[in-house]
Structures are given as structure tokens and as C-alpha cells.
């Protein structure tokens, strides 16, 4: 148990039938850093992400979070331990307001604590205040009363990340936060993620190389379910194996 | 011997349930549509059987003409109404088909009266067949053979014809089939008519055993649901085995604990849900 | 179209109107005194306007059941065809403890509420093991189970004949009779008071952390889970609350009729409750009162003239789904809006576009 690492996996594996989507992956995410996982399509990034968020039960190996085993913990229980995730395909409460989206996200950290009838939903100050702070940080305060579904695509992507922030996580798991974003919006997201890396531990799955190279402290390159290369951005950039893996995808 | 008798009864009943549920499951598989009027169409089949038998004096004509009539009504409902609601959530499918079943139920009472009818066992199938040393009603024996034949034909239709191929492919991806240049509207309407026609056929076949009454729709629907929950929605094999299981349980229980026979099939369903939430053959 | 049949979160939601937040609250909050005052006024007016006290009482009883169904459907996105389980059990249990246990009115109602909550939590816990269409099919099958149990236990329930001679005791406190409920007006007043309390309570529940989370689960279950909510718990509790309201409604109905028929626990009763909810408007509590009122009044008038009036209900259900997804209350609301101002801003006060659901991707 190294205290420098917030998340470690030991021989983590996930097979579908005979196909090994994740094959004995040993991953170590250091605290207060941005750790990106990249790789060509089908490398196993998404399957790995599913294992980490609790969407899929691994078929082998262990996941340790803060030194505690969470391998078989359910997705919702992981939030209580201090993990939060965003979705690759925007997954908001489309018909609820931006403020309500974030308030629900803040309240979620308490899990079953929300099984309360006798108070009004806005009565817990810490939840509404956290929601307002995150809204401020995302620059969405003006849109507080707008339905999430009516935001621009870029704003929805920001809100998507903001929802995860409201879980007061130690570790943020971001699944392609720039997916589908226009070129003009991407710098805003890059800045946000770089900023988050100072306060939180961030694990990022991303296709956009520009972002990955500029914000990451560590990059893990996956290929065929396993780890191909791991290192600092400049090391990864220079590694011929990485180029080969990506070129293989093109060919 | 008593048990053999009940097992045979259960097979016949189970095969009727199979036809009923296969219709439900085929529609769901392709159209992703849940037909809560399925029981009402089963009832309609039974009443058509009564009327056509009265009118022509022959059960065989009703067996031949009844299912196409039910299928035609289903086709008409699909073209005029149901096709407009596929894009809505499942809840809306349910509400609309509940509406249709209410209309069918009340129309049945208007046409045939509020009291049930019994249908005589068809000519040529009255009496019993002696097997070894015990006698079994000829009609029920015919039922097992005939439904097996229909089941086989249905399997052939789904597995080996172009239509069946489209239905199966469409169950995987309706967009794909549409892209291949198939008229998806026509395919949907025909599948809906086929599925509901099977319910009508099941209703006709069960009429000489069970009779008909205007409020049987919900009960039949409940059984069809039990079968697909047990067998797994969208699975043809599941509908067959689920149907047989439910038929056998109901039939065997009727000698052991008559009042609890219907109860037991729901107990079976609860057990399956607890042990295998996705049904015996369901897709996760 | 999602051909695998595994429903996405939004598919179990009640649709366009229901996806709005409590529509009745948003409109009526601008009326003096808010929705509670509107309901209070209606409760006073109903016995005056309607042809009989019994009819007014019946409306309120079904409005309670509709309110409970609406909590599941309109706010939780859970379409339950098992509401008659709780309605019928409430009728049977309260009657039995009054007949055989010598229970008074209030203890009998309390018994029904507690039993209804437990039963509903059980049914809910089993049925939510699957989502979407399987869930609905299971609630229907459980209703059939309950029906056959009631039918089989004819020594207790009277089977087909129903449970006869259900008393209507007057509430007592320390041996003093508070009010004589054998009088139709007094019984109406008692039911109205209870309805008012339940209406306020359900409104409060919807505005609570629990209620807001239930709406979140309806809107997007996957996201709600990822935010840390164990969504199953919220659905089960919603069922329990629904059962705790529906069962006393069944009890009151038995006391109104002095009789607990087998029909109370039949699938058709569940259907009726769902139809009242949809006709009134899902996701609006005043709509529930409207739906139950429309149902009872129309059935009373039409069943005199034409016993096959249910055929119209079937048609009405289809038309509402196609053309008036907000139900009657949705219709009233858009009429009032049009009346108040021609156009202008098309937003409800909480910032949700009025037809937000229409733009909502259903697949």
C-alpha cells in the first residue's frame, strides 16, 4: 500500500466469453495528478473504465482505492468512498434545471441519506451551496434556472464534469470529457481539467491527443487489453511502440 | 394413470400457452412493442370460434377462417393506430393497448352478451381414444398434435424463410433491415398481424375445452406474461418451454390442490424471478 | 429503436407531461393560497355541487388511490398494474380486524396503512429486479397472484361473494365518540379531512430530498446511480408510500359500501386506477383529483344510460395518449395559460420549458 497512490489495480482482468477485454492490468494513479489512459479503438479503455466505476464486475484481479479493496463494490457505493465519474455520452437530468442537476449530484454523496420525507429538498444548505459553487466554477450561474437539456452542447459537457465534482470526490474518473465538443469549446475544458488536477486526483480517458499531452502528468497507453507503455507525456510521445499501435489502427 | 392423464392435459394446455406467448414474444422481439391487448385478441378468437361454428355448423371452418380474421383486425389496428406510437415510451404502448383491450371487451359484451358461452367439441373429435388401458379425449389428443404441427410450421417460418430472416434480423437491429431496402412498415404490420393471429388461434383451440367469457382477457394476458417472464421475452424456445411448464404445473396442481392451481403458476414465476431475473432463456 | 428490449431509463417514464416537474404546483402556486387552498375549496364545494354525498366520498377515495399511483407513475416513472393488491388488501384487512378483532376506525385504518406499506415494499422489491416492460408485466402478474389468493381464502374474504357486513365504526377518543360516521355527510367530512392530510403529505414528500431523488431516478437512472444513489431503495420506498396511501383508501371504500367485493383486488381495479391517473394527468397531484372525479362522475352518469360506457374509456385512453399526454389537468393548464396571455414567455417558473419532454430523447 503506497500512500502516494490513490488507486491501484492488481492484475485486473475482464473477459467476455473468451475475449480478454482487460488483461492483467496493473495501474497506479498518484494523488493530485492527472493520469490519462489512451489507446487505439478496442484497446480496452472503456472496459477498464467500467471496472473502475463499478459498471462491470472484473473477472480477475483487484482494485484498491485508498488502500481499501473495492473490486466488487457497487457503482453507487463507490461514490460514498470518494470516487465520482462523468459519462462519455452526456447523461444529465435533461428536464431538470442546471441548479437541480447539481444539487442532486451534491446530495448523492450521502446516498441513502436522501431517503428523507419531512424536509424540503433545498433545506440542506451544504448541498445547495456546493451546487452553487460548482455552478460558479463552470461559469453556468447565469443558466441556473435553465433545463439541462436546453444548454449548448459544450455547456452540457461542462455540466457533465460538474456533476462529478459535486460528489466531493478524491478521485475523478472522466470518460472522454471532450467527446463531441466543438473546437471552440475544447480550450475551456482543457483548462478545467488541468485545474482540477491540482485539487483532485483525475483519471482521464480521452481521444483528443492535444488535451492528453497538455494536461496529463502520466499517460498509460493500452493495447489489446494490456498496458503497452506508461510514462510522462514526452516519453510516450517519443515511444516508437505507441506510434506503431496507433498506425496499426489506421492500417 | 391419473398423472399421465394430467400430464397429457398439461401438454395440450401448455402448447396453447406457447402459441399465445410466441405471438407476444415475436411482436416484442421485432417491434419492441408490448401488446397488452393480447389476451383480448385471444378472447376474440374464442368468440369467433363460437359464432363461426354456430353459423356454419363446423368447427373446422372456424379453425380455418378465425385466425385470419383476428390477424386482419390486428393488421388494421397496426396500420391505423399502433404504428403511430412505436416512437413513444413503453408506458404509452401499454396504455394504448389497454385501451384497445377495453374496447374489445365491451364490444364483445355488446355483440355476444355478458354471459360466457361453451363451444361443443368438434365433430369427429368427440369421444375418447383408448391408449393401452386408459381412455383419453380425442380432441385433447388432436390438440397436442395440431399445436405441435403449428409450432413446427412457425419455427420453419421464422428460421428458414425470407420473412423469418427479416423478423430475426430486425429483432437485432430494425435500422439495419430498413437500410437493406425492406419496407419496414409492411414487415412490422405483418409481424403484428402474425403475432396477434397466433393469439386468436390459441383462443380458438382452447374454446372447446375452456369455453369463452368476456372477462377472460386479463386472465389470459396474465398467463402469457408469466410464460414470457419465465421463458425470457423475445425467446421462441423460452415461450415453448415456459408455456409447457405453466401448462403442466396448472394441470398437475388441479388434481392436487384445485383452488391453488392458478396460484401455483404465479408462484413458479416468482421463483424464477428470484433465481433467474432474466428468465430461463432471456437476454441480459 | 432499442431492439434488445433492455429499456433505457427514459422508457419507463410516463412521457411528455410527466417529465415536467409538478405542473399543478407550478401553476397553482400563483393562485392565492396555492394548491392546498384550491383542494380545500374543492373539498367544500364537492358535496354541494355533486348529486350525492356518497358520490363525493367515492371520488375522494379513488383520488387517494390515484394520488398514490401518480407518485409511482408520474414521479417515479413506475407504471404499476398492481395497485389493486394494496387497495383490495386494505379493504379486506381493515374489515377483518374490525369484524373479528373489534378494532375501531382509526386502528383499522392504521392497520391497513402499515400492511399496505409492507405489502407494497415486498411487491416493489420483487418487481424492480427488472426494469421497463418486465417490471410492468410483473406487477400485473403479482396482481393476479393476489387475486387468486383472495379467491382461494374464501373463508376469510368471502371469495366471489365478497366480504359482507363491513362495519363503519365512529372514531372514539378515550371512549368518547367524536363524530357519528353513519351519517353520509359526516363520513364525507371524515374522508375529506383524511384526503386533505394525504394530499399535503404527498406534496411534501415530492418536494423532499426523497421526492427530488425519485424524479432524478425517473429522469435518468444510470446517472442517479453514478451520483451515489442506490436507486432500488428509492423505488421500494416509493412503493411503500404508495401502498400506505392506497390500502387505507381501500379500507374507506369497504366502509362506504359496508362490503368488500372481490373486484377490489382484481386486475381491472388496477387498470381503473392507472386510467384515472393518466386521464387526470401524470405528474400533477391536482390532476389525480380531477381524474378520479371525472371517472366516478362519468361512470355514474353513463352507466345509467349505457352499461357499456367502458368502451368510451378505452377510446378516451387512446386519445389522451395521442393528443393530450398531459391528461385533463394538462389541458386545463394550457387553456388557462392561453387565457392569461397570448404567447409571451413559454417557461414555467422553475425554468423548465413547458413541453420539455417533447424534446427529450426517448431512446
Image (spheres, grey):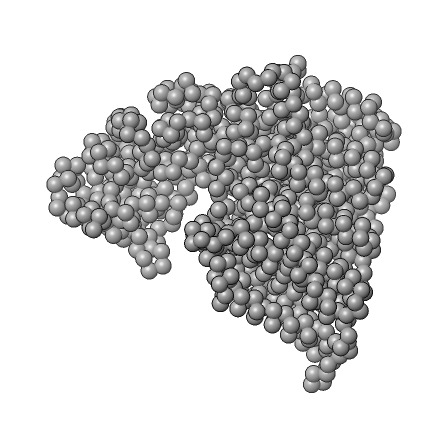
Residue located 67% across and 30% down the image? C328
Q: Is residue B54 above or below residue A176?
A: below
- x and y percent of residue B278 in the render? 51, 55
- x and y percent of residue B203 in the render? 70, 61
- x and y percent of residue B197 in the render? 64, 59
Q: Quadrant of residue C110?
A: top right
Q: Quadrant of residue B244?
A: bottom right
Which residue occupies the foreground of this view, B70 or B12?
B70
Residue located 56% across and 49% down the image? B33
Q: Is residue C191 above or below residue A226?
A: above
Which residue occupies the foreground of this view, B34 or C103?
B34
Left or right: C361 in relation to A29: right
Q: Quadrant of residue A161?
A: top left
Furthest toward the top, the residue is C32
Total labels drawn: 0
Left or right: A90 in relation to C317: left
- x and y percent of residue C82 in the render? 66, 45
Residue located 31% across and 52% down the image? A21
Residue A91 appears in the picture as rendered: yes
Left or right: B1 in relation to A16: right
Which residue occupies the foreground of this view, B223 or B141?
B141
Residue located 69% across and 18% down the image? C37
Q: Is residue A205 above or below residue C204?
A: below
Residue B223 appears in the picture as rendered: no
Amino acid at each position: 500500500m503506497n500512500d502516494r497512490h490513490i488507486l491501484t489495480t492488481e492484475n485486473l482482468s475482464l473477459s467476455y466469453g473468451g475475449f480478454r477485454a482487460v488483461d492483467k492490468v496493473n495501474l497506479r494513479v498518484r494523488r493530485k495528478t492527472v493520469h490519462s489512459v489512451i489507446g487505439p479503438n478496442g484497446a480496452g479503455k472503456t472496459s477498464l473504465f467500467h471496472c473502475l466505476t463499478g459498471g462491470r464486475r472484473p473477472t480477475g484481479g483487484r482494485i484498491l482505492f485508498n488502500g481499501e479493496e473495492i473490486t466488487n463494490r457497487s457503482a453507487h457505493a463507490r461514490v460514498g468512498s470518494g470516487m465520482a465519474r462523468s459519462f462519455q455520452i452526456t447523461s444529465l437530468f435533461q428536464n431538470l434545471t442546471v441548479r437541480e442537476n447539481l444539487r442532486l449530484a451534491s446530495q448523492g454523496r450521502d446516498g441513502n441519506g436522501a431517503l428523507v420525507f419531512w424536509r424540503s429538498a433545498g433545506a440542506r444548505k451544504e448541498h445547495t451551496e456546493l451546487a452553487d459553487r460548482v455552478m460558479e466554477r463552470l461559469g453556468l450561474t447565469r443558466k441556473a434556472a435553465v433545463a439541462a437539456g436546453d444548454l449548448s452542447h459544450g455547456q452540457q459537457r461542462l455540466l457533465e464534469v460538474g456533476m462529478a465534482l459535486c460528489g466531493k470526490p478524491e478521485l475523478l474518473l472522466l470518460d472522454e470529457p471532450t467527446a463531441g465538443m466543438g473546437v471552440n469549446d475544447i480550450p475551456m475544458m482543457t483548462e478545467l481539467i488541468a485545474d482540477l488536477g491540482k485539487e483532485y486526483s483525475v483519471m482521464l480517458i480521452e481521444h483528443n491527443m492535444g488535451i492528453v499531452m497538455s494536461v496529463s502528468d502520466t499517460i498509460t497507453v493500452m493495447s489489446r487489453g494490456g498496458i503497452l507503455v506508461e510514462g510522462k507525456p514526452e516519453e510516450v510521445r517519443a515511444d516508437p511502440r505507441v506510434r506503431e499501435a496507433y498506425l496499426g489502427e489506421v492500417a | 394413470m391419473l398423472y399421465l392423464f394430467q400430464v397429457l392435459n398439461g401438454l395440450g394446455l401448455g402448447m396453447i400457452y406457447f402459441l399465445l406467448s410466441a405471438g407476444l414474444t415475436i411482436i416484442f422481439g421485432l417491434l419492441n412493442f408490448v401488446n397488452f391487448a393480447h389476451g383480448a385478441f385471444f378472447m376474440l378468437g374464442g368468440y369467433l370460434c363460437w359464432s363461426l361454428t354456430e353459423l356454419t355448423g363446423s368447427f373446422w371452418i372456424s379453425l380455418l377462417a378465425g385466425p385470419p380474421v383476428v390477424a386482419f383486425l390486428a393488421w388494421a389496428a397496426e396500420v391505423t393506430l399502433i404504428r403511430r406510437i412505436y416512437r413513444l415510451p413503453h408506458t404509452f404502448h401499454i396504455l394504448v393497448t389497454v385501451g384497445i383491450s377495453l374496447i374489445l371487451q365491451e364490444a364483445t359484451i355488446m355483440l355476444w352478451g355478458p354471459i360466457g358461452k361453451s363451444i361443443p367439441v368438434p365433430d369427429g373429435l368427440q369421444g375418447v381414444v383408448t391408449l393401452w388401458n386408459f381412455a383419453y379425449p380425442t380432441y385433447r389428443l388432436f390438440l397436442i398434435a395440431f399445436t405441435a404441427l403449428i409450432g413446427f410450421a412457425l419455427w420453419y417460418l421464422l428460421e428458414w424463410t425470407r420473412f423469418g430472416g427479416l423478423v430475426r434480423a430486425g429483432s437485432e437491429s430494425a435500422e439495419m433491415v430498413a437500410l437493406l431496402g425492406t419496407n419496414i412498415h409492411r414487415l412490422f404490420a405483418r409481424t403484428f398481424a402474425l403475432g396477434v393471429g397466433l393469439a386468436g388461434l390459441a383462443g380458438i383451440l382452447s374454446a372447446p375445452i375452456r369455453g369463452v367469457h368476456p372477462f377472460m382477457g386479463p386472465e389470459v394476458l396474465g398467463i402469457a406474461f408469466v410464460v414470457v417472464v419465465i421463458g425470457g421475452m423475445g425467446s421462441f424456445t423460452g415461450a415453448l418451454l415456459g408455456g409447457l411448464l405453466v401448462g403442466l404445473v396448472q394441470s398437475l396442481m388441479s388434481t392436487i390442490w384445485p383452488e391453488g392451481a392458478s396460484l401455483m403458476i404465479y408462484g413458479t414465476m416468482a421463483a424464477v424471478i428470484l433465481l433467474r431475473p432474466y428468465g430461463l432463456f432471456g437476454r441480459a | 429503436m432499442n431492439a434488445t428490449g433492455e429499456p433505457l431509463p427514459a422508457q419507463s417514464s410516463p412521457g411528455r407531461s410527466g417529465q415536467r416537474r409538478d405542473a399543478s404546483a407550478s401553476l397553482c402556486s400563483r393562485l392565492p393560497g396555492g394548491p392546498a387552498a384550491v383542494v380545500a375549496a374543492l373539498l367544500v364545494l364537492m358535496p354541494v355541487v355533486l348529486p350525492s354525498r356518497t358520490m363525493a366520498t367515492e371520488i375522494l377515495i379513488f383520488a387517494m388511490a390515484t394520488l398514490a399511483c401518480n407518485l409511482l407513475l408520474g414521479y417515479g416513472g413506475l407504471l404499476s398494474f398492481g395497485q389493486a393488491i394494496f387497495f383490495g388488501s386494505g379493504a379486506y384487512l381493515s374489515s377483518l380486524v374490525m369484524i373479528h378483532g373489534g378494532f375501531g376506525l382509526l386502528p383499522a385504518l392504521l392497520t391497513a396503512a402499515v400492511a399496505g406499506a409492507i405489502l407494497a415494499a415486498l411487491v416493489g422489491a420483487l418487481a424492480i429486479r427488472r426494469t421497463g416492460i418486465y417490471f410492468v408485466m410483473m406487477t400485473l402478474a403479482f396482481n393476479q397472484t393476489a387475486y387468486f389468493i383472495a379467491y382461494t381464502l374464501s373463508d376469510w374474504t368471502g371469495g366471489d361473494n365478497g366480504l359482507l357486513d363491513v362495519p363503519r365504526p365512529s372514531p372514539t377518543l378515550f371512549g368518547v365518540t367524536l363524530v357519528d360516521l353513519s351519517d353520509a355527510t359526516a363520513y364525507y367530512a371524515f374522508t375529506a379531512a383524511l384526503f386533505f392530510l394525504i394530499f399535503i403529505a404527498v406534496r411534501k414528500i415530492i418536494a423532499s430530498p426523497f421526492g427530488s431523488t425519485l424524479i432524478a431516478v425517473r429522469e435518468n437512472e444510470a446517472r442517479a446511480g453514478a451520483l451515489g444513489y442506490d436507486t432500488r431503495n428509492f423505488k421500494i420506498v416509493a412503493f411503500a408510500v404508495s401502498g400506505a396511501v392506497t390500502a387505507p383508501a381501500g379500507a374507506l371504500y369497504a366502509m362506504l359500501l359496508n362490503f368488500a367485493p372481490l373486484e377490489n383486488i382484481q386486475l381491472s381495479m388496477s387498470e381503473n386506477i392507472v386510467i384515472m391517473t393518466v386521464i387526470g394527468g401524470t405528474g400533477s397531484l391536482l390532476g389525480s383529483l380531477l381524474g378520479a372525479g371525472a371517472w366516478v362522475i362519468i361512470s355514474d352518469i353513463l352507466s345509467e344510460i349505457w352499461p357499456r360506457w367502458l368502451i368510451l374509456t378505452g377510446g378516451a385512453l387512446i386519445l389522451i395518449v395521442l393528443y393530450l399526454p398531459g391528461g385533463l389537468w394538462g389541458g386545463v393548464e394550457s387553456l388557462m395559460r392561453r387565457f392569461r396571455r397570448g404567447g409571451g414567455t413559454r417557461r414555467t417558473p422553475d425554468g423548465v420549458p413547458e413541453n420539455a419532454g417533447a424534446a427529450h430523447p426517448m431512446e
